Amino acid sequence: MNILGISAGFHDAAATIISREGNILFAGHSERYSKQKNDADICRGLMQDALCHSVDHVAYYERPWLKQLRQWYAGQGIEWNKVTLNQVLQQQVPEAMQLAPTTSTHNHHACHAAAGFQTSPYDRATVVVIDAVGEFDTITIWAAEYDKMGHATYRKLWAQHYPHSIGLFYSAATSSVGLRPLDEEYILMGMAAYGNATAAVGMQTLVKDSDQIEFRDNLHTGIDSRYLQDIEEFDIAAGAQAIAEQLIDSVMRRARDFEFSTNLVYMGGVALNCSANRNLGKYFDNIWIMPCPSDAGSSLGAAALTYRKQIHWTNAYLGYNIAGDYPVADIMAVLLRDRIVGVASGRAEFGPRALGNRSLLADPRGPEIKARVNEIKRRQQFRPFAPVILEEHVDWYFDMPRGFPDSRYMQVIARCRQPDLFPAIVHYDGTSRVQTVPQDGSGIRQLLEAWYTKTGCPMLLNTSLNIRGEPMVNDRADADRFEREYGVTVCS
C-alpha cells in the first residue's frame, strides 16, 4: 500500500508518500506552496502534488489527545476540536479522509526515531531524539534494529519529559535576543561565534546540577530577565550555544554508555545545530542525521512506522519538480560573468537546507561576495554561508570532525584549512558548514566539476534561494519573482 505521512498543526507542516516497495515517492513542505514561512497547516498545493499518488493509509506524526493533555498540563488549555485524529485530518487533509480507508497515529518521538533509523544505512543503531517537546517527551534514547522479518523495532532506553527541554531552552534564548523562536535558532547559532560564553555565567544557573538534563524554570514561557542581566546579545548567543553543547554531550554520553551500538542516528530539531554536531564523533563511530530531522521530517517517520521496514533512501530531492536538465552551461556563464547566480531545477529539497536544486550560488573566493549575498538575501552581515565542495577534495580544504568523513546534507561545521583563500564561506570562528557532493551524477555535481575544470576551485558558496523571512523558491513562478525583485539571474 501507499502511505501518506502527515505532520501538521504546529509548525512547518509537511507530507510524505511512501510506496508499497519502500520508496519515497514525494516529500514536501507546506510553506513552499503557501509562501508562509513555517506554515503550520497543510495547504492545497502540497496535497495536490502528494495525491498525484494513490493513498491507502494515512499516518499522523503524534497522538492528538496526548498532545492536548500536555497542553492542558502546561496551562495552555485544550483545543477540543483537535482531540481526535479524525478531527485533525478533517481540518488538515479532508481529501485523504475520503481516499484512504485506514489511518493511524504514532508517538511524536517515535516518528522522529523512525524517520532517522529507517532511512539510515544501519541494521542496528542507537537513536537519540532531542527537540522542544513532543507529547511529553523532550529527549529520548532508543535501541533500534530490524527483526528476522525485516521489521524495525524500537526499545526506549531513557527519556526526559516536559518541561525540561534543551530545545525549549534554545528557543527561549533565541527569543531573548529578539529573534523568532522555532524559526531563527540557526541565526542564534551564527551569533554565538561573536560572543563570550563566560560573560553569560548567569545563564548557567538555569541548569540544575544533575545528570538528568533538568532546568530550574519552565522555559516554555521564555528566560526570566534575572538570568540575563547585563549580558550582551552576542554573549547570550554564545552562552546558549555552550550550554546546549554541554547538555547534548551529556545525552550522547548516556546514549553511548548503554553500549547498544556504535552507530548513531540523531533526530529532532536540535539535530540541526551543526556547531554542536561536530562533537558527536567523540561518542559514536558512525553517524546518520536524516536531512529533515525536525517535525516536517516526522511526516516521513509516521509513514515509516506504518511501513515498518527499511526505506530506500537515495537523496533529499523529493519535493516539487521543475522539469528539465540541470542548466550547467547557463549557470557557468552567469557565475563567470556576475559571480552570483540562482538555480531552480529538478525536485525541491526536503529539509531546511538548499542542496543545489533551490540554491543561490557564488564564487567563494572574493572578499566582497559575502556582503553582496547577504545584501541580496536581506540578512544580517554577520551571517555565515556554506561551501558546497567536490567530496574527494574536502580533506584538502577542511578539517572534518571525527565521525563525519563527509557531510552530504550540510549537517556539521569544520575548520577551514585555508580561510584566507575563501573568505565568503568562512565564519568568524574559522569554521564552515560543509556540504560534500559525491560522484553521484547529480546536477550540482556536474556543475562543481565544470567549475573546477574552469577555475581550479572545487567549491562554491551555497545558500538557499530565498530572502530572510520567506520560504525557499519552489516553482518557476517563484524563481521569476525572485529574479525580478532581487536582480539575480535564476537558471532553470
Image (cartoon, grey):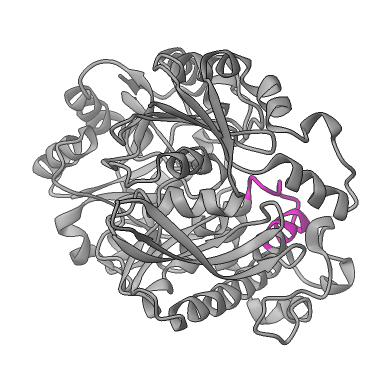
Q: Which residue is painted at 25% across and 65% down in the image? A: 405
Asked whether, in this view, residue 71 is left or right of residue 372, the answer is right
Quarter of the rendering containing residue 279:
bottom left
- 174 drawn magenta: yes
Q: Which x, y percent locates residue 280?
A: 42, 72
From the viewer's perspective, is residue 265 above or below residue 181? below
Asked whether, in this view, residue 346 is left or right of residue 301, the answer is left
Q: Which residue is painted at 45% across and 22% down in the image? A: 56
Quarter of the rendering containing residue 333:
top left
Farthest residue in the left direction?
453
From the viewer's perspective, is residue 138 above or below residue 107? below
Q: Which x, y percent locates residue 304?
A: 43, 42
Residue 45 or residue 80, whichever sits in front: 80
Q: Which x, y percent locates residue 323?
A: 28, 15
Q: Which residue is painted at 59% across and 23% down in the image? A: 35
Farthest residue in the front direction?
149
Segment tinted magenta in the rendering? 170-184
Q: Which x, y percent locates residue 146?
A: 33, 57
Q: State whether residue 428 appears in this view.
A: no
Q: Which residue is painted at 46% across and 16% down in the image? A: 51
Q: What is the tally of numbered marks visible in this picture?
A: 0
Residue 449 or residue 151, whichever sits in front: 151
Q: Looking at the rendering, in which quadrant would you find the C terminus?
A: top left
Q: Looking at the rendering, in which quadrant would you find the N terminus?
A: top left
Residue 86 or residue 369, whichever sits in front: 86
